[in-house]
Amino acid sequence: MSDGGKRPWELPFRNPGWAGNTGEFDLTEAQVRGDEYVASRPLDGGHPSGAPTYPYMLADKDPDAPLFEGPYRVRYEKILTRYPDAQAALLPVLNLAQELRGHISPETMDEVAGLLGLPHAYVRGVATFYTMYNKRAVGRYLIQVCTNISCNLCGGDEVLDAFLEHAGVELGGTSEDGLFTVTEVECLAACGFPTAVQINSRYFENVTPAGVPDLLDRLRAEAK
Amino acid sequence: MAYPYTHEKEVRLLSRGWGDPATRTLAGWQAMGGYEGLRAALELGREKVIDEVKASGLRGRGGAGFPTGVKWSFMPKEKKGVHYLCCNADESEPGTFKDRELLRWTPHQVIEGCLIAAYAMQAEHAYIYCRGEFFEANQVIARAVEEAYEAGLAGENILGSGVSIDVTVHQGAGAYICGEETALMNSLEGRRGLPRVKPPFPAAAGLFRRPTTINNVETLCAVPHIVKNGGAWYRQWGSEKSPGTKIFCVSGHVVRPGNYELPLGFPLESLIHDVCGGFREGRRLKAVIPGGSSVPILSAAECVDCALDYEGVVEKGSMLGCASVIVMDDSTNIVKQVRRMVDFYAHESCGQCTPCREGTTWLSRILVRIESGRGTEEDLQTLLDLGRQMTGTTICVLSDSAAAPVASSIEKFRDDYLALIRRGEAVGAN
């Protein structure tokens, strides 16, 4: 939050979001995120309802991964059971393809069209409508910084600048080491905890420009 | 365990249990009286459940404020084929962040609400359309659905009643417009998220062309409490026309932003100054957006004696929307923030209707020109004219929503615009 200059204003309390600390809030990060309460995957006998939901992208995403084999074939088939027709499964199936491949290339769109028996042009039309389908390859971590009104009022633009500076990238670009792609994103629905940042599947809240280097270091360490 | 920023004036009904990981689990939710609402509903019968919800006066929490019980009664009584229920968890209105907390702390509350609503409307499948970005909330709600199935609370023959209701978590893929109910249905069908022309209304031909009802997460979360305790009980909070509690999402320049569950009709000034701790030292109120970015901006003077219920905010010239209160102090650069909101609508317009597709982009370009000090006074009139042509001329209200903050800010903060146009000076920093 700015005092009229570029200096960010520290919020005087911490909320239960996760920004590397929870202050006086006595919970672990996993508890706040809900990581301890996760649906078992269909492969483990889990319910089909939990088939298409996460994560955004695998750490070892492979743009040439087959659609779909092994556990992913099981999940794919379970997804199909939840809808009256194959067309309705299009979004969850594209999500699944992106989880494996990291982005949805035109070839992936065509492959998914073939799987579901839909026209190629139709699937391209749908896939390009939605912003969460990466149309080209992204880094190991896709960093999406909210700069919409609530975050912007409290310095979202400065947080975005800090990410660009410390990751050493242009907006939308990927760092040379392939770790970070930084983009701007529309409201992430975490407006009370500015600035909100989504990094792959995870939210980070109350991010300040000063906290950006530590956050990037944490990601670098995780990637090793 | 207390949520870290509870306030004594709060009435924690839906948000009871937030901040306690135990609430997430089926056992934890049942220990708090969970699924008693579902049992009560199955005993009461469909008609009486709808009657109780009608009696409670519960109004849709997604923005429009339409009475929920009335909406439910639009569904055909004589069932000829499949009915659907959609839970709208595609929360993406700038300023709103309540549904994500409901999903991640109290997933069983959401599921119980879905089951009761589906039972009342004879729907055999409830789809929870969860915003794509909510991976963390998604993993939680998916686990909760799985637990509900394991315990016989969802699926075939729920609690031995002979009623069968499937629940599916459907993950979106990033599009604000999919929060509009007909766009949501198109998206669920695997199409682009384009709003549909009404009629036919969803209760006649909705998802997969079958009778469908779409309710917001918060609306459905209130249902178990109402069914368990009765419609009259729910009316102990709020006003005659706006009964009950509401989760207010406060963001922006207050000391303690966050979600606060308060009775409807709560005074806006008290929300800002008491509950949220007011402003930083030396700052004072400049403007408030009371219902998310889609509603007109209120000036500081209009915030005096403003009651936060559906009628009270309309009286002051705005709308309660989903009660997302964005507070701006006197360090705010209104022109920049309005431009930022318009950029958002330009990005999120589905492109179906010309006034919206073209209008949002034009608004944005003119505002950028003004913000950079190259605007003229005629531009203000152009913005207002454009806004008028964008209002009421499109299939959905995204276009109207983009025009509302522009028109209201020019009306109420004309001096800020003129300072930029005449002298190239921005008022405020952020």
Image: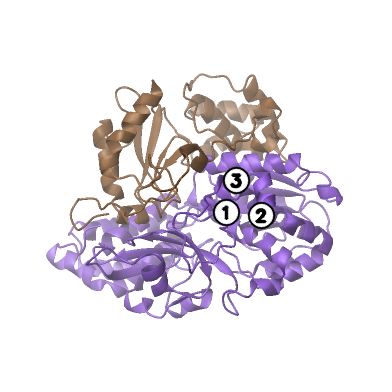
Disc with the residue nearer the chain's start (1 vs 3): 1
Q: In the picture, which chain is purple?
A: B
Along the line of sight, the residue nearer the viewer: B230 or B352: B230
| Number of residues whose C-alpha sits closer than 10 Å to that of mark 1, classed few (under 14), some (14–19) or many (20 or more) | many
Asked if labels 3 and 1 touch by Cβ distance under 8 angstroms, the answer is: yes
Asked if labels 2 and 3 touch by Cβ distance under 8 angstroms, the answer is: no
Q: Which residue is mark 2?
A: B32
Q: Is residue B127 above or below residue B400?
A: above
Q: Which residue is mark 1?
A: B17
Q: Which residue is mark 3?
A: B22
Q: Is residue B125 above or below residue B391?
A: above
Q: In the picture, which chain is brown?
A: A
- Amino acid carrying label 3: it is Ala
Disc 1 sits on a residue from what chain?
B
Mark 3 → mark 2, Cα distance in angstroms: 10 Å
Disc 3 sits on a residue from what chain?
B
Along the line of sight, the residue nearer the viewer: A36 or B83: A36
Disc with the residue nearer the chain's start (2 vs 1): 1
